[in-house]
Image (cartoon, rainbow, N blue to C red):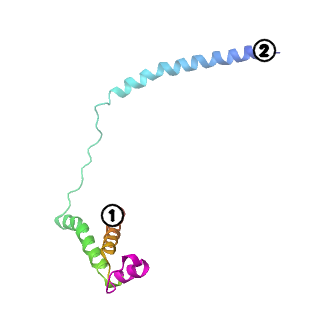
Amino acid sequence: MEQQQPQQMHQASAHQAPAQQTQQQQQPQYEDEYEEYEDYDGPVIQQKALSTTDQVISEMKGPLLVILLVFLTNFGMLNQMLAKNVPRLAGGDSGLNMMGLVVKALLAGIVFYVVKRFLL
């Protein structure tokens, strides 16, 4: 019985070897088939020409977003909220010190990046 097992394993490996050889022989055929298409760049996709109005609107999204952010960050309510929640940012007369202005500018920059990246 022990002698039958090695023979069965030898027979199984003998069946696998021709299958591996045929796979190796087929690979060059596939490579030859693809060599014909190496110089092919794919279809040329043409974009529609935008009308003047659409082009102006597309170009104005960034500047309009900056205008909106400057308008919103110059509200006194935002300064008071920052000064109240982070006392280090408070300056005299319920305003912000230099660090507060830097934090407010960073917040505006982050909002600009997020809106520009994901919404525009």
- The quarter of the displayed image where residue 79 is located: bottom left
Residue located beneath label 1 in the image: 113
Res 46 label: none
Q: What stretch of residues is rendered in magenta?
A: 78-94
Which amino acid type is marked by label 2? Gln
Is 89 part of what is drawn in magenta?
Answer: yes
Left or right for 25, reference 120: right
Compared to residue 31, the image places residue 14 above or below, namely above
Which mark is in front, 1 or 2? 1
Kind of residue sitting beneath label 1: Tyr
Which mark sits nearer the N-terminus, 1 or 2?
Answer: 2
Q: Is residue 15 left or right of residue 31?
A: right
Residue 106 location in percent, x, y?
33, 68
Residue 4's x, y, as percent? Answer: 78, 14
Can you give x and y, in whole percent of width and height, for residue 72 in the image? 31, 78
The C terminus lies in quadrant: bottom left
On-image quarter of the N terminus? top right
* Residue bearing mark 2: 4
Q: CA distance from mark 1 to mark 2?
A: 72 Å
Q: Is residue 60 magenta?
A: no
